[in-house]
Amino acid sequence: LAKTTQPISMDSYEGQEVNITCSHNNIATNDYITWYQQFPSQGPRFIIQGYKTKVTNEVASLFIPADRKSSTLSLPRVSLSDTAVYYCLVGASFSGTYKYIFGTGTRLKVLA
Amino acid sequence: EAQVTQNPRYLITVTGKKLTVTCSQNMNHEYMSWYRQDPGLGLRQIYYSMNVEVTDKGDVPEGYKVSRKEKRNFPLILESPSPNQTSLYFCASRFSTGGNEQFFGPGTRLTVL
């Protein structure tokens, strides 16, 4: 299993773009990179997933460089409601990943 | 509505009294998993199940049992709870292929006295 490393915490202001980088030096060829968001006392919620280059959905973008040893979750124009913990995971369900290591995630605090 | 449900949501019990936390999903997912979350330690995987009658240990399986007799249900059993199992527990499910998007339940807050 590829271990991931993320900053412990980040602060931002409303309306700013936030970029959270995750390091996964031992990522395997078949692994996907997946990001989750968790609010206090709630279960994590899937945000976005990607394999390479860039993926964008209605809430975030995910940037993955060619070597895939890191990835960056980009949240455009954050609001107070984006205050949460963000987790980066790597794995590949279709090639047999059943164990997941969430780590402690990045605690994002959005300030008014 | 597609969802993962857990019961109970809150439970206070005493050391040694067997308990079961139920988990059910209505999305026909093959894969289900249990996690515990403790302050400063993040989410740690307890057990997972790839399909009916197929289960395996996660990172912290000691003191827990699971069973998967039906596709939709994946109960977590604590045969003899101890105070160090006081935690917030989450159940999750996903399809066996197609990505790593897991759907999480609302959580069960367990206190063992």
Image (cartoon, coloured by chain):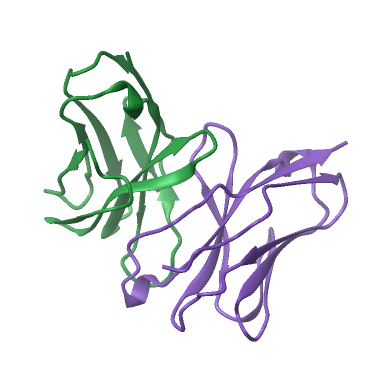
Chain colours: A purple, B green
The image shows residue A42, relative to residue A6, as above or below, that is above
The residue nearer to you, when weighing A112 against B59, is: B59
The residue nearer to you, when weighing B96 against A26, is: A26
Query: Exactly how many numbered labels are in the figure?
Result: 0
- Place of residue B13 in the rendered image (x, y in percent of width and height, measured from the top left): 28, 15
Q: What residue do we see at 50% from left, 41% from top?
A: B41
Whether residue A31 is visible to the viewer of this picture, yes or no, is: yes
Which quarter of the image is occupied by the N terminus of chain B? top left
The residue nearer to you, when weighing B101 against A23, is: A23
The residue nearer to you, when weighing A58 against B79, is: B79
Using residue B51 as the reference point, say whether residue B23 is left or right of it. Answer: right
Q: What residue do we see at 31% from left, 72% from top?
A: A96
Q: What residue do we see at 78% from left, 39% from top?
A: A80
- Place of residue A94 in the rendered image (x, y in percent of width and height, measured from the top left): 35, 75
Whether residue A56 is visible to the viewer of this picture, yes or no, is: no
Using residue B53 as the reference point, say whether residue A36 is left or right of it. Answer: right
- Place of residue B11 in the rendered image (x, y in percent of width and height, measured from the top left): 33, 19
Which quarter of the image is occupied by the C terminus of chain B? top left
The image shows residue B47, relative to residue B30, as above or below, that is above
- Place of residue A112 in the rendered image (x, y in percent of width and height, measured from the top left): 88, 36
Q: What residue do we see at 60% from left, 38% from top?
A: A39
Using residue B43 as the reference point, say whether residue A39 is left or right of it. Answer: right
